[in-house]
Amino acid sequence: MSDETPVTDDPSTQSPKPSPKPSSEPSSSVWTKIRVGLKPPAEQSIDDATDGWGLAPTRGTPREHLVAAVWFVMVAAVFLAPLFGGKSFSVVGSRQTDVYPWTAQDGPPQVPAQFDSADLSYPWQLQLQAALDEGTLPFWSPDVFSGGAPLYANGTSGQLYPPRLIAAMAPERWAHDLYVAFHLVAGGLVTYLLCREFKRSALAAVIAGTAWMLGSFNLGWVHLEVVTSMLVALPLGPLLVHRMWRRKTMGSVVATAAGFAVMIISGHLLWQLLGWLIALLYAAALGLTSAVRSWRSGDRSDAWGHLWRPPVAFGLGGALSAVVLVPTLVNLTQTPRKAFPVDLLKAFETPAATFTSEFVVGPSFTTMTTGVMNYHLAFVGTVVALLAVVGFFSRRPGSALARTIMIVTAGVATVGWLGRLAYDLVPGMDVFYPYGRLAGWFALGAVLAAALGFDLLVELVQRRWPTAAAGRWAMAAPVAGVSICVLTVAQLVPLGHNLNPPFQPRDDAHWFPDTPLIREARKLQQDAPGAGRLAPIVLDHVKWTEGGPAILRSNHAAAVGLDSTSGYDSTLPLPAAQTLRYLGGMPVKQVLSDPLVGAFVTNLEVGVTNYAALRSQGVTAVVTVPEIDPNDPRLAPLRPYEVAYSGPDGNLLRLGNAAGVISVRDDLKVLNTDAAVFEALPLASSPNAPIFTSAAAVADSDLSEATIASRNDEAAKQGSRTSAKVTDQGINSIVVDVRSAGPAWLLVGANDAPGWTADIDGVSVPIVRANHNHMAVPIDGPGRVEFHYRPPGLLSGLVITLVALALCAGLLVAERARRRLMA
């Protein structure tokens, strides 16, 4: 994809340029620069046509960059104008109209296509803010999936991403708005700098930056914080790569590595890796072609430099991000998500119109849906699209990159032979779907081509009418460029507002407020012996992508401080996902054999839920949508229970004979298989029932079946009364006070996962997976049992990152010393 030739910024190596004709105006005048820049081709080189507002001889000045930055701030302010009127760019208020208990008072349902922002990002933001208040990070998400799931290493939360950390320090209801505003401005500015890197004119670069930040894909997806950073990451990759190739310095290598590291930790790991694949391939293309050219010219040193710099930069970037990357990769090996089958490719086919007619006139839709988000958002403005068509056929620096991005992404998205090739050969493309999301990548190529197209048209006008660039026509190009920017803003801002739910008031009523049901449920959990857990039950055949009627869906319960079986994430412990499928009525054989494709969300339907096993998961109460009668015969297997609350926002059923999340048991039975454990879960539901585990789980622990049998015998002989109480529930820890006169087992309803450790009064004790997905530890009497979670690989990743930082510093110091010696 390289159409570059070696360039240098050293004036001594460039051919002399003709001096501009004298002007009667002051030389410092912007208008003088414009007129001088647009003088006839006979008096200047077309490649170096103007100083800033035509075809640029430089990559811009600080003053030009500042003007561009101010423009992008103004454009972002136009799009986010309702913020200045006391509203918020949030989907929480719209999403709660579709989910009980809030839909009872907020209907009719709106079902925003960007509901992930409310289901994932907002609860995670609250956890991050709470953890920062405690002086830590939320390594674990404790209130989801019937016992929690890894958060720091889930590959999407991006907790160490600097803009996320800074936004999390803002007030709760401003964090998302500030995060979005930053990325809009930064995305426009980085795209502008990328165009300037290719020596595009200032106006052409501003046009491209404006179209990129307001493009339909970016504004359609900007709510989803797991991918918001792609606004910056996609143009940043080629910018840093080209700059490294051009400057050939160790500083540019380190800068590329740092940029790669920051973006890899910013959000959705798969999206970031696919985004940086473009940068990696671009680096390879530039490096190899330049190395061959240098080798043929006899400059072997320069050739080797072009070959070693890209792999060093990307390898060093991976090492810098290791503090996140290593624990994430370790965690991904423990999760149930699998590749989708190849026969689904056809179902993911993107209409060709997305990259043809809709690319020119914009997407046509009456209601914003996930289908529109996934398949129809390549539009970057009509005028910009036409400029992109012109620039597509250019042969100037950057054109091959733009063409390659557009052709490849459109080809893969429309699932022709390129789509199948990507599925087979590109890592991650058998998990990334639908391919229509590549419209965002296509849009980047389009705005780069548009910048080329604008400058090419200016050149053509200058060539065709040399005298038209002087006198009263001298302002034609700048006026045309500014007009295109204004027209693009006027076209894309309303479309962006239409793509998103309405801005919501910044008041309590639109941020998952407490309702009578929530208050009663919270009270039940706090009062339950051994803590408690909720199980939300919905009507039959309610799918999570279709909206309501649902109740405390996804991570909504966690957002309001309730521990529940519900949850929503792309990664979670495999035993937890299997148990929740079993609770949802799936046969045991299918539970243990079927892979999970895509994100996982718990769905417990009234007619098929395995009620007999609910109590084994620490469930002490059930909430149902109000459409389900509390005395519905289908709920009979739940008995004994009492109706603690019934209202328009839902029903709350308190379960009798429920042990809760924490309990002490005398017997840990080892069964042959995990399937046998599932079949025994109904027997594990009462406070005095045995705990069940499998031979495989024991083999994975530091216990033996003989040790377990011996302890069971001792506990049976003692027959002592025991109790346990949670005294401290942290984000990454659980502290339990146990009162026991002899040997027993402490059952903790937190999902077993690598990274958990336990100790009693400071002495480490082994953990065994219990009741398929929870944890049990042996106890010998009264004591304080502490459980702590740290992501596996965190320490080793931190060490690698620190070593990489030291190496970067050393490389920069060494280069500076070398320059001093050569000076």
Image: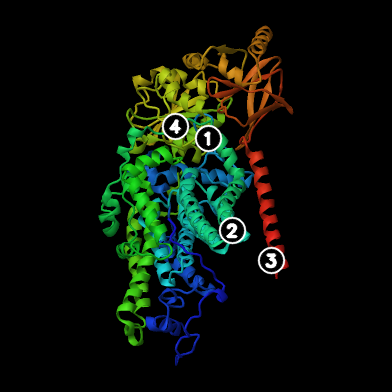
Q: Nearer the viewer, residue 530 or 675?
A: 675
The percent position of residue 401, horizontal first and vertical second, equals: 42, 57
Secondary structure state at the residue bearing disc 3: helix
**Label whose residue precedes the other's in the sequence (3 or 4):** 4
**Label whose residue precedes the other's in the sequence (1 or 2):** 2
Q: Nearer the viewer, mark 2 or mark 3?
A: 2
The amino acid on which the numbered mark 2 sits, given as a three-letter code, is: Arg
Q: How far, Cα to Cα, is label 1 from label 2? A: 43 Å
Residue 67, labelled with which disc? none
Q: How far, Cα to Cα, is label 3 from label 4? A: 51 Å
The percent position of residue 335, horizontal first and vertical second, equals: 51, 31
Query: Circle 2 is placed at which residue position?
Result: 300
Q: Nearer the viewer, residue 531 or 141?
A: 141
Number of residues whose C-alpha sits closer than 10 Å to that of mark 1, classed few (under 14), some (14–19) or many (20 or more)? some
Q: How far, Cα to Cα, is label 1 from label 4? A: 10 Å
Query: Circle 1 is placed at which residue position?
Result: 332
The percent position of residue 389, horizontal first and vertical second, equals: 31, 62
The amino acid on which the numbered mark 3 sits, given as a three-letter code, is: Arg
**Label whose residue precedes the other's in the sequence (2 or 3):** 2
Question: What residue is shown at x 51% (from left), y 14% (from top)?
Answer: 673
Q: How far, Cα to Cα, is label 2 from label 3? A: 21 Å
